Amino acid sequence: MLPPKTRVLSAWLALVLTGQASLAPASVAPTNLKRLSLEELMELKVVTATQTAADPFTLPFMVRALTAADFSREAPVSLSGALSEVPGVMVQKTANGQQSPYLRGFTGFRTLLLIDGIRLNNSVFRDGPNQYWSTVDPYAVAQLEVVLGPASVLYGSDSIGGTVNVLTVAPELTGPAASGRLYTRIASAERATSVRAEGTARLTDKFGALAGVTLARHGDLEGGAHVGSQPRTAYDEHGGDVKLVGQLQPGVRLVFAHQSFVQNDVWRNHSTIYGQAWEGTVPGTDLRRSLDQTRHLTYVQVQAKELGRWIEDATFSFSRQEQNEEQFRIRSDSRSDRQGITAASLGLFATLHSTSPLGYWTYGGSWYRDNVDSFARRYTAAGALERIDVQGPVADASTYDLAGLFVQNQLTAIGPIDITVRGRYDRAHAALGRTLDPATGGAAPSFSKSWDSLVGSVRATWRHSPEGKALAFAGLSQGFRAPNLSDLSRFDTAASGQIEVPAQMVRPEKFLMQDVGFKLRTRQLELEAAYFYTKIDGMIVRTPTGRLLGGLTEVTKRNSGDGFVEGAELLARLPLGAGFLVSTSGAWMHGNLSLYPGNDLARRIREPVSRLMPLSGRLALRWTAPSQRGWLEASAVSAARQDRLSSADLADRERIPPRGTPGYCAFTLRGGMKLGANTDVTLAVENLTDIDYRIHGSGINEPGRNFIFSGTVRF
Amino acid sequence: MAIFSSSKFFRSTGRALGWLLLALSLGAPAQAAKDPFEYQVKATFLFNFLQFVEWPATATQPGAPYIIAVAGEPAYLEAIAAVVNGERIGDRPILVRPWAAQTRCHLLFVSDQAPVPSSGWPQTVHDQPILLVGETADFCANGGMIGFIYDQGRVRFEINAPAAAAVGLKLSSKLQRLGRAVTTRKGD
């Protein structure tokens, strides 16, 4: 029998896989805990003086958990915005409303987002920053957690830079028969107002329902003192969600949920004449480039405990998720086009765990099928339909399957050192329907292709004392990303001045991460630090074909990227007494990639990884009132100039200044208090000195001096 | 692994281990702290307990607050305060106080860091209608009413219903069903 510490870590990982539990249950805020019944409290796993580890601090990874309390304090404008204070994360913004977090140097389809355990990622996700994370309602999040580094063994394809799990709000089966929550956020520099209304009904002790609606309107973003208003950055978004929870019988719970979210008219203004030159950037020439997108997720999940003699608990999930996007572009000569994608994904997963004389086992499988339709229609300057393309951004009438099996067992080795070994097998299959032949402009023959991936990981954890006061960890983790429809058939403007044509001869990308780290928690200090080195083997990168297409550089995907990203992250908290707490965090990254930077296929060079996070840090001093009813915080975030630019960065004149993105230091004041029993308010002044700055790789500048009010009323 | 053989990796690993040693040396004198989550979970249990216990009429007045007293770690005081802040049970607010001999309370939580009175905790609150909750081993067997225990990483609790009944407290059937029944060890 394995010791409880090992068992619970296994169980935690299993629960994470299913999304039925938080990545880090230890970080549940008191406000959330209060929603739990006694029975549910008794199922929580905790760190105890003598037993197990479920707190992020005690886990041998760099894990950050953001609770409802963190959301209330930081009042982020979006889901991605909530990650901006996590060391090792850089939240790039192609547009206001299109944020794409970089986790340990990777973004887009090299990061994975789970919603209640279900993959948001699908086969149309593209390389580089993308906007899909913006389809998650930030105000319907109960908890958000970030695991940095490759975790493909646990989560499958795409989990390279990191994985974020979003747990959405759920009804409680205890407490009042009916309750509600009203939330509002108003931000001056964003000219934004967001409102969420939420109601919960407990129909019986065994059945509860929750419904919520979110509306948000964002005006043109006001930059710093010199940039001023950034035109065509306004957009609207709204969402709704329903969740029903039923306790079918002791130990068996059924969850049904539906979520919808819509974004309208989000402009990539840096590509248009409305973009603003800043530090040498050059705005684009389009008259318009805007995007609408929607996401609908419906799922049923069953969580069961003690299924027979061998299965301790199990989770089964069935989901359908539909993602729609449509871009409207008007070029400088008034020709226009509309193109879009509908990706409908069915998902199944099962996760079980069992105790045996050989240890505590976690095992299961998942299968996702994407049915993808795409379109592109071209119009003349007069607005007449000129042609309908064979495909849109990806091959039309296509399917993509991603199936995986995993098994995990944890072994306790010598003394205080735990050894964890995991393995996973995945198979991806793409069947492309209507695909463009770039040579003829007509349809290419349909084709299909499959790939297999087998990955493993080994991790050692040394604990200084049974209390988990200090731990050190080291690990070796393989990661992979199977080629998707975007790799195979994307025919779209991918980066400024480039056009991409389909590629079929690609294989899965492989990654190997080594990391070491330590964590320390005493009464005087909490400290976490890690160093990682991720080896990149055969990254599918845009490679020039040596041809021009429509005046743009033609590129295609090949496994020609080899290199590495390394970095270090540090987080420290020092309680000073009398309610004062100092916290500081920082991240450093460095990376190179060998690739073909220009049109010359004979010239392969080693250059910096594109859009790599600059040296960044944060320092904050917080005071909490003895009554716990109020708090104040002063903080500073800073980043060094990032002038290690790749050739793609240098070519991206619309977003990246030619001499690199300047460094900055922005100050923020925040404060919050409880007004009565049911009302919380937060006031903040971000970018106190009204500086002009932007996150590296972004198409817009950050807000200037930004007064933010947020308030929550519960009833 | 080729990467492991690289000097860069070993240099970095060496630096990380150096940081670790430094941190350990800094932290060594400090006393090991409980995980905050444990405080939060137990605090939430206490909040729940209030709802499943009936006090004798002499111990309650309409609208008067429920008072939770905490003996031992201040962190518990903060965690419990955070959980019950703004909460009411019926029309009654909940207050949290550090324990002192003269403290009047409805629930006394005794952390494992609290010094044990020479007569033991049950005798200290003898005959008062105070729900006595603790987290030390055999707390209920030694006369406590509810004692936290651990079961495979989960917080569970033991219940000594006779001890509660002896001072006029009624524990709900749900509480008794969920808790592990224990009686006071003979001779104590």
Image (cartoon, rainbow, N blue to C red):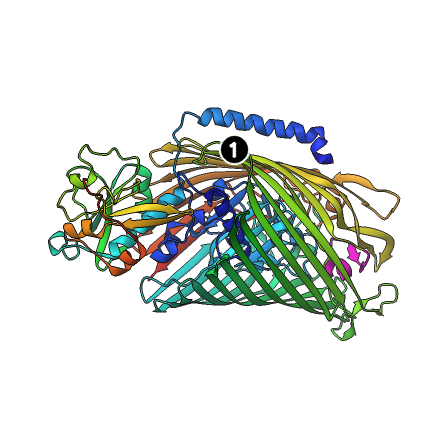
What amino acid type should be assigned to the residue bearing mark 1? Gly
Residue at mark 1: chain: A
Left or right position of A709 against A93 = left
- The picture quadrant where one finds residue A638 is top right
Work out whether residue A6 or residue B25 is closer to the camera in this orientation and state it: A6
Main secondary-structure element of the magenta-colored stretch? loop
Asked whether B183 falls inside the magenta stretch, the response is no
Residue A234 seen by the camera: no
Question: Relative to residue B179, is residue A250 drawn left or right?
Answer: right
Q: Which residues are magenta?
A: A485-505
Query: In the image shown, does A231 or A371 lie closer to the viewer?
Result: A371
Relative placement, left or right, of A71 versus A703 is left
Q: Pick the residue in front: A161 or A543.
A: A161
- Would residue A612 appear left or right of A382 to someone viewing this image? left
Residue closest to the far left: B58
Magenta-drawn stretch contains A494: yes
Residue A628 visible here: yes
Q: Residue at x 38, y 56 (%)?
A: A40
Which percent across, then down, holds residue B17? 57, 28
Q: Name the residue: 56% across, 42% down.
A: A411
Q: Position of residue B183 (x, y in %)?
A: 23, 48
Write down the quadrant of residue A196 in the picture: bottom left
